[in-house]
Image (spheres, rainbow, N blue to C red):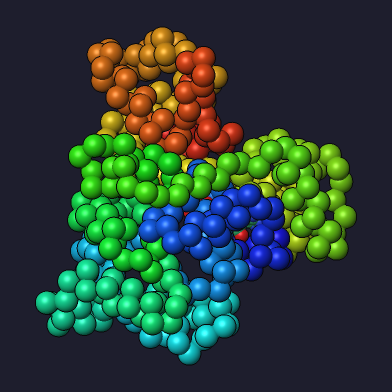
Amino acid sequence: MLFDRRPKIRGEDFYDRKEELQLFFKGVEAGEGLIIVYGVRRVGKTSLVYVGLSELGIPFIPIDVRGFLVDLSFLSPQILLGVVGEVLKRYESYQGRVEEFLSNVLEYVESLDLGMLKLRIREKRGELPTKVLEHANRWAKKRKTRVVIVLDEAQELRAYPRWRDLLAWSIDTLENVTFVVTGSEVGVLSDFLKLSDPNSPLFGRARLEIKLSKFSREQSIDFLKKGFNEAGIAVKEEETEDTVDKLNGIVGWLSLYGYYRVTYGLTHVEALKRVEEDAAKLLASELEKIVKYSPKRYIAILRAISLGLKSWSEIKHFTEGVAGYIPDNRFNSLLQNLVKYSFIEKTENGEYKPIETLLPKAVEMLRKNTE
Ligand SMILES: Nc1ncnc2c1ncn2[C@@H]1O[C@H](COP(=O)(O)OP(=O)(O)OP(=O)(O)O)[C@@H](O)[C@H]1O
Ligand SMILES: [Mg+2]
């Protein structure tokens, strides 16, 4: 089914992305030690990785880093890699039935009794993360395969510099282990891996980068048509076009729209309204994490951009009108942070604009929540 809320696992449910998948296959088969999949929210990063790995049919360990955020201490390599040994044990009994393996493992990782895991790992205090990886490497070598360790939403690991050392070491030493990391461009490439920082252990290391872009207008229309066809539902051309105009090529929102129409029988207007609300809520909750450090100024900048102001000086003028005088360097750093976290972008001619069409709605929600 093309219209589904969860990340895709099977190739037949996954629309297009042929080039990116080919690149992914080649990377794993060539034995890359590090593959980075990045792109904006809901663009299909997790799906690409799962579909790619299940088509390849090789063992992998999916770790959604966000799942460990309940307790920050779980983000240490030692704790997270504790999962690796457990999952490899399970893989044996699912040989060849990747889908079944994955759903079992995902359930296991999601419902992981974190307290238990922590205790178990504490008992093995002496066990270094490198030992766990060496074990995974030996395990794969013996079976003439590779082990892929997926760190989904890896940017959350940015506070743990040891991960970079561990990844660099793994790339250099472990022939049969591949790390796949996903996240937003700035989050994962720059904040976590620090690939362009000469002081980072990963600087200059071999890796494969796969960028997922938004769908084009044609692809988006075709995606909706195929999804509705598959569900046996006739939808008016102008509704499809309106949806594509409003949801801006982000497949996660397009498929959610289709899901609401097909599963709950919502009308075009109702489904679009719900998706816009869901999308704006998600965006607002992510903005909140950044904006809280300087709410008045950030919200003023975001409002200016939402209103369609584009140049640096127009945005600054508006912001100062609302939040009072701001020194240039302070203003710049706030603006750059919004670019850095993929909320706004700077165009080639130096103008600022929202990345998602729903930014204005999200900013309004945020304003209401913070007032
Ligand atoms: N190529 C595709 N074909 C069909 N559906 C897709 C495709 N890519 C993603 N989806 C759907 O879009 C939604 C978002 O996908 P996914 O979770 O993989 O994206 P993501 O970029 O990892 O999102 P997030 O930023 O929340 O981590 C899911 O419902 C998934 O089923
Ligand atoms: Mg994801």
Q: Residue furthest bottom?
A: 93
Residue 151 seen in the figure: no
Image quadrant containing the C terminus: top left
Q: Residue furthest left?
A: 126
Question: What x and y, as percent, mark residue 132?
Answer: 26, 74
Image quadrant containing the N terminus: bottom right
Give whichever of 62, 300 is nearer the camera: 62
Question: What x and y, as percent, mark residue 255?
Answer: 67, 54
Quarter of the image for residue 323 reads top left
- Asked whether, in this view, residue 261 is left or right of residue 21, the answer is right
Q: Which residue is depicted at the point 11% across and 77% down?
A: 126
Give whichever of 65, 315 is nearer the camera: 65
Q: Which residue is depicted at the point 76% across and 61% down?
A: 262
Question: What x and y, as percent, mark residue 252?
Answer: 60, 51
Question: What x and y, as percent, mark residue 61?
Answer: 41, 71
How many marks the image carries: the answer is 0
